[in-house]
């Protein structure tokens, strides 16, 4: 498993800066950092992370049931 953070090293400070160089007439809202990263890569990393956590919780649950019967 990779030790990389979910979104990598994205510098989102410029995306949320109130004094941005964008025109003030644009009401699109803040740009999310996901715009700079391929969405499929982020989804794969998130699913792998969630799958590992759920598998770990299932293992703990099974061990809890086994220890109650012993």
Image (spheres, rainbow, N blue to C red):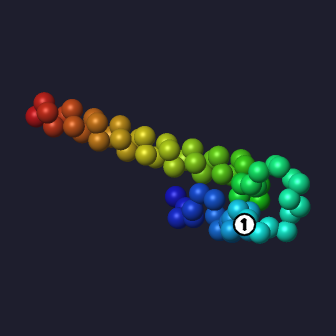
Q: Secondary structure at mark 1?
A: loop
17 in relation to 26, above or below: below
- Whether residue 13 sits left or right of residue 66 in the image: it is right
Q: Position of residue 52 (x, y in %)?
A: 46, 46
Q: Which residue sits at x=53%, y=64%?
A: 3
Residue at image point 51% right, 49% down: 49
Q: Give how far across and how far down residue 68 sits, in percent.
A: 14, 33
Left or right: 12 in relation to 58: right
Instruction: Relative to 12, say whether 61 is above or below.
Output: above
Asked if one can make out residue 16 in the rendered structure from this viewpoint, the answer is: yes
Residue shown at 74% from the left, 54% from the top? 30
Vertical arrangement, residue 43 with respect to residue 33, above or below: above
**Residue under circle 1?**
17
Query: In this rendering, is residue 1 above or below 68?
Result: below
> Viewed as shown, does residue 29 lie left or right of 43?
right
Residue 14: image quadrant is: bottom right
* Placement of the C terminus among the 4 image quadrants: top left
- Residue farthest to the front, as pictured: 24
The foreground one among 47 and 17 is 17
Residue closest to the far left? 70
- Residue 37 visible in rendering: no
What is the x, y in percent for residue 67?
16, 37
Report how many numbered discs are placed on residues in the image.
Answer: 1
- Mark 1 closeness class: few <14, some 14–19, many ≥20 residues within 10 Å: few
User: Which picture quadrant has residue 2?
Assistant: bottom right
Judged left or right of residue 3, residue 57 is: left
Q: Nearer the viewer, residue 34 or 3?
A: 34
């Amino acid at each position: 498993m990779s030790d990389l953070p979910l979104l990598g090293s994205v510098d989102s400070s410029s995306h949320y800066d109130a004094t941005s160089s964008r025109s003030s007439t644009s009401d699109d809202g803040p740009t999310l950092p996901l715009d700079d990263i391929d969405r499929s890569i982020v989804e794969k990393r998130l699913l792998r992370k969630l799958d590992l956590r759920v598998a770990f919780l299932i293992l703990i649950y099974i061990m809890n049931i086994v220890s109650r019967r012993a």
